[in-house]
Amino acid sequence: MPQREHAKKSFDSAIKGLANPKHISDLQDRKSSIVLARFIRRTLQQFHLGQVEFYDVVHEVYVRGTKLIASGEDIKNPGAWTRVTAYNVIREMSRKQQKEQANSELIESQVAPDNCEETKEIELNILKQSLQDLSEKDRQILELRFFQNLTWKQVVTHLASSEEILTEATARQRGNRAVRRLKKLFLSIKTNKLSA
């Protein structure tokens, strides 16, 4: 068996064991898979990623490992490599979540920068107008992500039901662009109203 095929088979076996340790006949390998699965779940909790599923992390690790092997690299110790890569994936997910939360807080701070009820009312109307001025697609993705509080995975699933197929990364990029456009519209309308 060529080396790349052997590396791929070894890596696939490690990932399958991670997803379902009961199918591993070797007791030591089974224990290692169980420990690794617990590590991933614990790390998700430590990074406060309760909405991210264990299998999302495993899937991303598998995609990265497969690409690495396809490029000619060898994963000598699939268990150790998976542990490090899973940690990095979770850290990246945490950073993205923090960025999305900051964007959401920015929208909220634009709507209610102080305690004046009249100002809040005016800015809420400006936000509503800004949302109406966005394209249908921008409005839809902001509605799903920020108002219905869906995860990006859920957003993609929802859009797929209306026959719009996106990857999670594409949906996230579209959402970030929509937030930037909304902010720009909001500030433009607010400036025009204040100067009028």
Image: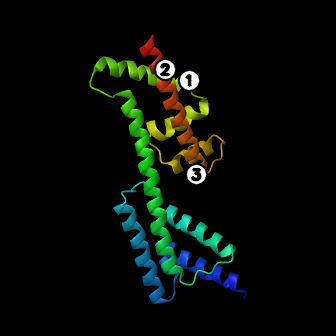
Q: Residue at x 33, y 28 (%)?
A: 113
Identify the coloring: rainbow
Q: Position of residue 153 (x, y in %)?
A: 53, 51
Q: Nearer the viewer, mark 3 or mark 2?
A: 2
Q: Quadrant of residue 42?
A: bottom left
Give the amino acid type for the residue marked by disc 3 in the picture.
Ala
First in residue order: circle 1 vs circle 2: 1
Q: Residue at x 52, y 67 (%)?
A: 58
Measure the C-alpha gap from mark 3 to mark 1. 25 Å
Q: Which mark is residue 133?
A: 1
Give the amino acid type for the residue marked by disc 1 in the picture.
Asp
Measure the C-alpha gap from mark 1 to mark 2. 10 Å
Using residue 11 as the reference point, say whether residue 98 is left or right of it.
left
Q: Nearer the viewer, mark 1 or mark 2?
A: 2
Instruction: Determine contact: label 1, label 2, CB under 8 Å.
Output: yes
Give the amino acid type for the residue marked by disc 2 in the picture.
Ile
Q: Is residue 77 above or below residue 134?
A: below
The 10 Å Cα crowd at callout 3, few under 14, some 14 to 19, many 20 or more, is few
For disc 2, the marked residue is 189
Residue extending furthest top? Answer: 196
Q: Residue at x 42, y 83 (%)?
A: 31
First in residue order: circle 3 vs circle 1: 1
First in residue order: circle 3 vs circle 2: 3
Residue extending furthest right? Answer: 2
Q: Position of residue 134 (x, y in %)?
A: 57, 28
Residue extending furthest front? Answer: 195
For disc 3, the marked residue is 169
